[in-house]
């Protein structure tokens, strides 16, 4: 008989989604987080439900381009050079995945293809639904040649069934007057969506979980107690917490516990940055991906959020000034007429695996522990479906999907 007491560790979008699906399945759920719901990476993303984001960063030829990208202050790739010795083992496996793009894209498509419907199923009937909308996602390019230079990625999307249509500059301006004169060419991805305030959205979901009888505890998990291939408790700064089952959704902080549980999938923090223009003079109809700068733009209540950039530097050092400066320069070049009251800055940690696929499933060394982390750039998009899968596994109902590509005990392809 399935034990219906369960602790979910981590209150980002994956953890909160898991807690809600478990609760709806009759579990007695405790949600544990060191800061509370949506305090980390889930708060600071671009708010794009990026169902078509199935092309990994590591594609053929990246290893040749990477040194130039790192040395160019106008490129969205940064590195804390002192961190390089620790990063190298991960980086070797990460770059090697360029030969596995089709496998990765297929697995990401399985996770993300119905992301908007999954969000509606999770948020429907809650206050969180007010932050969810069905909008397109537009890539803006300087010209058609720039778009064609990225044909490799668009061919992969087309192959796997991602729907999109090309847009001329005139079509972009007709679709959204705020885009007039900004881009020479665009791509409109269909059947996507957006969250107008990710932090408020996840907080509202957590509030519904609590209102329905769920328990939220603020505590830092420091260790996992293992005995006879089971977890018998979690060591925290508030004492030992115990349940029949456990789900770990700690994002970029999953590494130490994951290693103790037998997971060998390499994990790193991809430090992501955003800036917000408060009380901006420009409002966008849809979320925009500025292809040249690889950052997203999303109009939120009273602000315009611009989020992107990849920086490798680990979990411990403070934010860098250069990524913020780059985002400011790029926005100023694209929207020189933008006015605002102030700019707020934020940095967070994306949990990235060497093969760009999340870890979803049972822990190899503890049969009553489930894991859900490592979603890199698509945590918000894939969080509800991941939570649904984890809840089904906890209830003893394997999903009608082969989860082998995300298995905690998988060997990263070479």
Image (cartoon, rainbow, N blue to C red):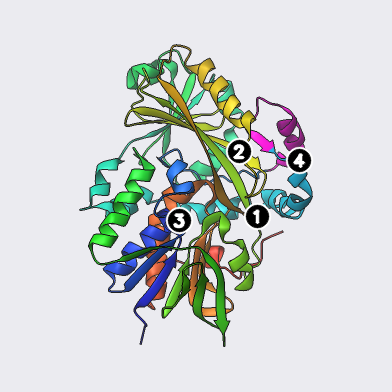
User: Which residue shows up at 46% across the image and 41% down it?
Assistant: 45
Looking at marks 1 and 4 on the same chain, the residue that comes earlier in the sequence is marked by 4
Q: Nearer the viewer, mark 2 or mark 4?
A: 2
Q: Is residue 48 magenta?
A: no
> What's the residue at 59%, 32% (across, down)?
150
Per the rendered image, the range of residues in magenta is 60-78
To which residue does mark 4 refer? 81
Q: Secondary structure at mark 3?
A: helix
User: Is there a contact, CB below 8 Å, between mark 3 and mark 4?
Assistant: no
Label 2 sits on residue: 319
Is residue 15 shown above or below 333?
Answer: below
Q: Are marks 1 and 4 in contact (CB under 8 Å)?
A: no
| Residue 400 seen anywhere in this rendered image of the structure | no
Q: Image quadrant for the C terminus?
A: bottom right
CA separation in Å, label 1 and label 3: 18 Å
Image coordinates for residue 105, horizontal then vertical, percent: 55, 50
Camera-side mark, 1 or 3: 1
- Residue named by callout 1: 354
Q: Can you tell which quarter of the image residue 347 is in? A: top right
Mark 1 vs mark 2, foreground winner is 2
For image coordinates 27% across by 48% down, the residue present is 128
Going from N to C along the chain, the mark reached first, 2 or 3, is 3
65 within the magenta span? yes
Q: Determine the secondary structure under disc 4.
A: helix
Q: CA distance from mark 1 to mark 4?
A: 19 Å
Q: Earlier in the sequence, mark 2 or mark 4?
A: 4
Q: Dot 3 corresponds to which residue?
A: 111
- Name the N-terminal-most of marks 3 and 4: 4
Q: Residue at the spot x=50%, y=63% of the render?
A: 220
Label 1 vs label 4, nearer the camera: 4
């Amino acid at each position: 008989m399935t034990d219906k007491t369960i602790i979910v560790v981590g209150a980002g979008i994956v953890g909160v989604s898991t807690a809600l699906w478990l609760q709806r399945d009759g579990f007695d759920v405790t949600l544990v987080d060191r800061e509370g719901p949506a305090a980390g990476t889930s708060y600071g993303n671009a708010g794009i439900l990026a169902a078509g984001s199935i092309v990994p960063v590591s594609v053929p030829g990246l290893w040749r381009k990477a040194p130039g990208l790192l040395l160019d202050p106008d490129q969205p790739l940064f590195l804390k050079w002192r961190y390089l010795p620790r990063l190298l083992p991960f980086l070797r496996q990460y770059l090697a995945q360029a030969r596995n793009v089709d496998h990765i894209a297929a697995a990401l498509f399985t996770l993300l293809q119905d992301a908007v419907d999954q969000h509606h199923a999770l948020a429907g009937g809650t206050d969180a639904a007010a932050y969810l909308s069905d909008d397109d996602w537009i890539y803006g390019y300087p010209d058609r040649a720039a778009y064609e230079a990225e044909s490799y990625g668009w061919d992969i999307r087309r192959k796997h069934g991602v729907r999109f249509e090309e847009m001329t500059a005139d079509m972009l301006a007709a679709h959204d007057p705020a885009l007039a004169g900004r881009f020479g060419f665009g791509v409109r991805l269909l059947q996507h969506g957006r969250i107008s305030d990710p932090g408020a959205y996840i907080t509202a979901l957590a509030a519904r979980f609590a209102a329905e009888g769920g328990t939220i505890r603020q505590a830092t998990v420091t260790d996992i107690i293992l005995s006879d291939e089971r977890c018998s408790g979690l060591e925290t700064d508030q004492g030992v917490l115990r349940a029949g089952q456990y789900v770990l959704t700690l994002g970029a902080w999953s590494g130490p516990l994951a290693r103790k549980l037998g997971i060998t999938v390499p994990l790193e923090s991809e430090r992501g940055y955003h800036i917000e223009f408060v009380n901006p003079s420009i409002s966008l109809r849809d979320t925009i991906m500025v292809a040249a700068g690889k950052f997203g733009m999303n109009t939120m209540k009273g602000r315009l959020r611009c989020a992107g950039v990849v920086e490798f530097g680990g979990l411990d050092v403070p934010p860098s000034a250069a990524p913020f400066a780059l985002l400011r320069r790029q926005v100023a070049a694209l929207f020189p007429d933008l006015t605002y009251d102030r700019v707020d800055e934020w940095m967070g940690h994306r949990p990235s695996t060497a093969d760009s696929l999340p870890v979803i499933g049972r822990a190899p060394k503890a049969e009553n522990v489930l894991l859900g982390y490592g979603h890199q750039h698509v945590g918000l998009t894939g969080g509800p479906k991941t939570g649904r899968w984890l809840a089904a596994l906890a209830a003893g109902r394997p999903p009608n999907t082969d989860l082998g590509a995300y298995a905690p005990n998988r060997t990263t392809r070479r």
